[in-house]
Structures are given as structure tokens and as C-alpha cells.
Amino acid sequence: MDGDFRTEFVREPAALKQHPALVLNADYRPLSYYPLSLWPWQDAVKAAYLDRVDIVAEYDDIVRSPSMVIRIPSVVVLRDYVKPQKRVAFTRFNLFLRDEFQCQYCGAKGDLTFDHVVPRASGGITSWENVVAACSPCNLRKGSKSLRAAKMALQKPPRAPGAEQLRNLGRKFPPNHLHESWLDFLYWDAELEA
């Protein structure tokens, strides 16, 4: 049987790649929601072996070493609390997340760029308060004109987001695959329906 497993694993090395572990902070919240804090199964097994995490849930599949058999972890909790960052980096991704991946002029989703509300040509700066997500047609339509001159309006005024605000926004965009063992930990603080 060991030979069959080994042969199958060698022929299909991708088979075990599909077993990521959800990583929770010591307070049982994910380190991040978007992107979801996931580790490859190998990292989760190594961290468990080194006593850096506790295994909370496991997949049905196993991995073997010469001296042990272990079920693949699906949810792990860090033993030491990692303090979340307070400062939010001004990145394209975080900007799109703040604007919920939609154009701030027309509400379209999909192929987004970013736009300076007060154009750089008019002295506008690149900051949270002056840059918004925009679809290409709206960005081209506005060009280097003011909102008034372009006869356009923002859906909401741009502001610098807080770290907690971005974490909460990230919860609205789950990844394509959520293992059933993760669900209780991803939305454990959501209000229950009566």
C-alpha cells in the first residue's frame, strides 16, 4: 500500500497542493480576510511539529514520513498573538478593496484603473483622499478635467481607510473555495439571525 501511495503522489504531486490551511491568530480570527490567510499544508505541518500552532481542524487526507502518519491540518491557530498593523499601506490593491472593486463614478465592476479626483495637472496629489477606482471608460471620459467640468460625480468621497475597515471589507470577497472546516472561523463574529 505504501508503494501505491508513493507512486500516486509522485505521479500527481498537485493532489496535495489543494489542501491549504486557514491560519488564525491566537484570538481565533484570521490574520487577514482578503487575501485570506492561508498556508500550504507543508508549512502548517512544519509549524505544528515545531509547536508554533495548534491544529483545530483537519482534512481526511494524510501524509506520511518514515516515522509518523499525520492528518493534513485544515485550520491552525498561532500560539503567539500577532498584533495587526494599524497603518494601511497605500497600494493599488488596498485602494480597490476600499472602493469594493467598483468604479466610483458609474459603479461598474471588472477592469479597473485608478483616477485622481483633482487631476495631477491641476496640482492633485496621489493620496487616499484624491485617488479612486475607476473603470477605463469613466477614466477616459474624465481625463484631466475637474468633476464639474466632466459633469461627473463620485459615489462616495475618498477617505483613508482604517485597518479594521479594510479587514471588514475583505470579508465581503471570499476566495473561490472555502473548505467547510473554515466557515465557523471566518464569520464567527457575525451577528446571528434570530
Image (tube, rainbow, N blue to C red):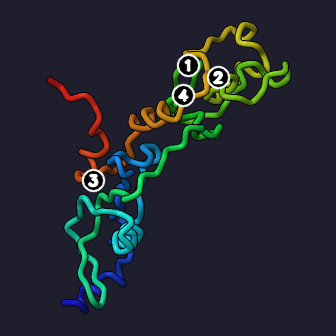
In the rendered image, residue 14, in percent from the top left (x then y), is placed at: 38, 72
Locate residue 19 relative to residue 58 in the image: left or right. Answer: right
Q: Residues within 10 Å of mark 1 (few under 14, many from 20)?
A: some
Q: Nearer the viewer, residue 106 or 77?
A: 77
Q: Residues within 10 Å of mark 2 (few under 14, many from 20)?
A: many
Task: Looking at the image, tell me whether mark 2 or mark 4 is earlier in sequence order.
Answer: 4
- Residue contact between numbered discs 2 and 4, judged by CB atoms under 8 Å: no
Asked if 121 appears above or below 37 in the picture, the reply is: above
Which dot, 3 or 2, sits closer to the camera? 3
Q: What's under tag 2, amino acid-wise?
A: Cys
- Residue contact between numbered discs 2 and 1, judged by CB atoms under 8 Å: yes
Q: Report how far apart the C-alphas of labels 1 and 4 lie in the structure.
A: 12 Å
Q: Residues within 10 Å of mark 4 (few under 14, many from 20)?
A: many
Locate residue 116 relative to residue 68 in the image: left or right. Answer: right
Q: Report how far apart the C-alphas of labels 3 and 2 lie in the structure.
A: 38 Å
Outermost residue toward the front? 80
Q: What's under tag 4, amino acid-wise?
A: Asp
Which residue is identified by label 2? 138
Task: Looking at the image, tell me whether mark 3 or mark 1 is earlier in sequence order.
Answer: 1
Q: Nearer the viewer, residue 155 or 140?
A: 155
Q: Report how far apart the C-alphas of labels 3 and 1 lie in the structure.
A: 35 Å
Which residue is identified by label 1? 106
Numbered badge on residue 99: 4
Task: Looking at the image, tell me whether mark 3 or mark 2 is earlier in sequence order.
Answer: 2
Which dot, 3 or 1, sits closer to the camera? 3
Q: What's under tag 1, amino acid-wise?
A: Cys
Q: Residue at x 25, y 76 (%)?
A: 70
Q: Residue at x 48, y 47 (%)?
A: 83
